[in-house]
Image (cartoon, helix red, strand yellow):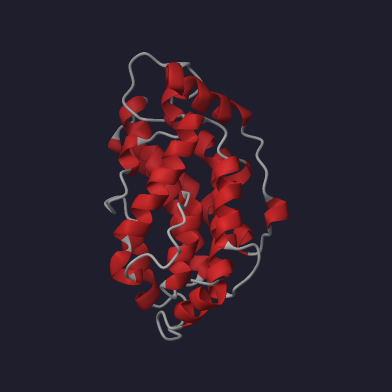
Amino acid sequence: MSRSSWSREADAGLNGVAAGSPAHLAPLMTLFSASFPTGGFAYSHGLEAAVREGYVTSAEAVRDWIDFLLRQGSGWNDLVLAAGAHRAVAEAASPDLRELCELATALSGSAERRVETTRLGEAFVAAASPWIGESPFDGIPMPLPVAAGAVTARAGLALNETLVAYAHNFAGSLLAAAVRLVPLGQSEWVGVMHDLLPVIETSARNAARSTLDDLGSAAIVSEIAAMRHETLGTRLFRS
């Protein structure tokens, strides 16, 4: 299917329902719910190695770790890529999905990160079939951020709300891993999630007006942790 076809289908999504209405929010809450069947619970994004090596040992450290990823690390790059994929489908903008998939894969700095993002992306597209039907994306293997942007655009869901939902899910997934790894208590979990809400909103808002020129990461320790995870002897997570 051509980009213009993707765009025409996206226009028909929710028939122009206003962004922020329950008709937008309910699907987004479902697609980015922790219970949406992508298998995200199996991946820690390198956090397991960071905990094991003493970089992340408290609720405050978990908060700072996730905050930095959303501002200047893989979380930020995911949001920029998701925004690009959303525009590629909703507006037939360049670059197209295939190019974005190649870029997203290249930005995965380790073998486990590549497996993580591609498997989660494939599962996301498959699980979203009630909204998009059989995948209309020419069988392109999609890393998660590209899949999220493309699916939500195809379903007629607004970009800004999509990015907030994606960022919230990104933070929540890492926090769920931290609960098991650090470990964190329930009150600590709630406190960290509360403290992350401002960066979730800010990063999503900034990504909504980003271009691919805004891609970049300063989260070197996180990238190294993701690489070192591959050689851990005993592991709870796949990444």
Of residue 189 and residue 213, the one placed in the foreground of this image is 213
The residue lying furthest to the top in this view is 233
Above or below for 95 versus 169: below
Of residue 20 and residue 114, the one placed in the foreground of this image is 114
In the rendered image, residue 89, in percent from the top left (x then y), is placed at 53, 70
Determine if residue 202 is in view.
Answer: no
The residue lying furthest to the right in this view is 213
| 45 on left or right of 125 | right
In the rendered image, residue 80, in percent from the top left (x then y), is placed at 60, 55
Of residue 61 and residue 32, the one placed in the foreground of this image is 32
Residue 171 lies in quadrant: top left
Instruction: Check the picture and name the quadrant holding the C terminus.
Output: top left
Residue 3 lies in quadrant: bottom right
Counting the numbered discs, the total is 0
In the rendered image, residue 71, in percent from the top left (x then y), is placed at 61, 45
| 120 on left or right of 8 | left
Above or below for 62 versus 194: above
Q: Residue at x 51, y 52 (%)?
A: 200
Q: Residue at x 49, y 72 (%)?
A: 158
In the rendered image, residue 179, in percent from the top left (x then y), is placed at 33, 33
Q: Residue at x 63, y 42 (%)?
A: 72
